[in-house]
Amino acid sequence: MNAMLYVAGILEVIGGVLLLAGLFTRPIAFLLSGLMAFAYFIAHASQGFFPVLNHGEAAMLYCFVFLYIAAAGPGSLSIDALAGKAQQPMGAGSS
């Protein structure tokens, strides 16, 4: 079988679960953004460059959504945010 499909599937499943939990949000979202860009250029770009012409809208949408998540970071209820609050010393951030 095609090894790229297996690797992409594993990354999407494990990365999706980690994003839902909010664990390692920025690096996982950046990795998934690159995966979606790679998938677009491998599977769709050969049929035409623009997503409307080659049916690659979903891949490009996910690419930019994951890139936004990588830039914005995790939410306040994520495991990353809760772990960050636990590591801050008492009184940090208050003036």
Image: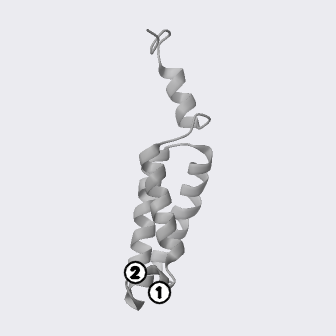
Please tell me whether mark 1 sits on a helix, a strand or a loop. Answer: helix
Observer-nearest of 10 and 27: 27
Instruction: Name the residue at 58% across, 36% down.
Output: 79
Instruction: Name the residue at 57% across, 43% down.
Output: 22
Rendering coords of residue 64 (x, y %):
45, 61
Label number found at residue 38: none
Instruction: Name the residue at 46% across, 53% down.
Output: 68
* Within-10-Å neighbours for mark 1: few <14, some 14–19, many 20+: some
Instruction: Name the residue at 45% across, 15% down.
Output: 93
Horizontal relation, residue 62 to residue 37: left or right: right
Q: Is residue 7 visible?
A: no
Rendering coords of residue 4 (x, y %):
45, 76
As shown in the figure, which amino acid type bears the numbered disc 1? Answer: Asn
State whether residue 53 is above or below residue 12: below
Q: Earlier in the sequence, mark 1 or mark 2?
A: 2
Mark 1 and mark 2 residues within 8 Å of each other at the beta carbon: no
Callout in the foreground (1, 2): 1
| Residue marked by disc 2 | 42
Rendering coords of residue 8 (x, y %):
49, 69
Rendered-image quadrant of the C terminus: top left
As shown in the figure, which amino acid type bears the numbered disc 2? Answer: Ile
Horizontal relation, residue 30 to residue 6: left or right: left
Please tell me whether mark 2 sits on a helix, a strand or a loop. Answer: helix
Label number found at residue 54: 1
Q: Is residue 79 visible?
A: yes
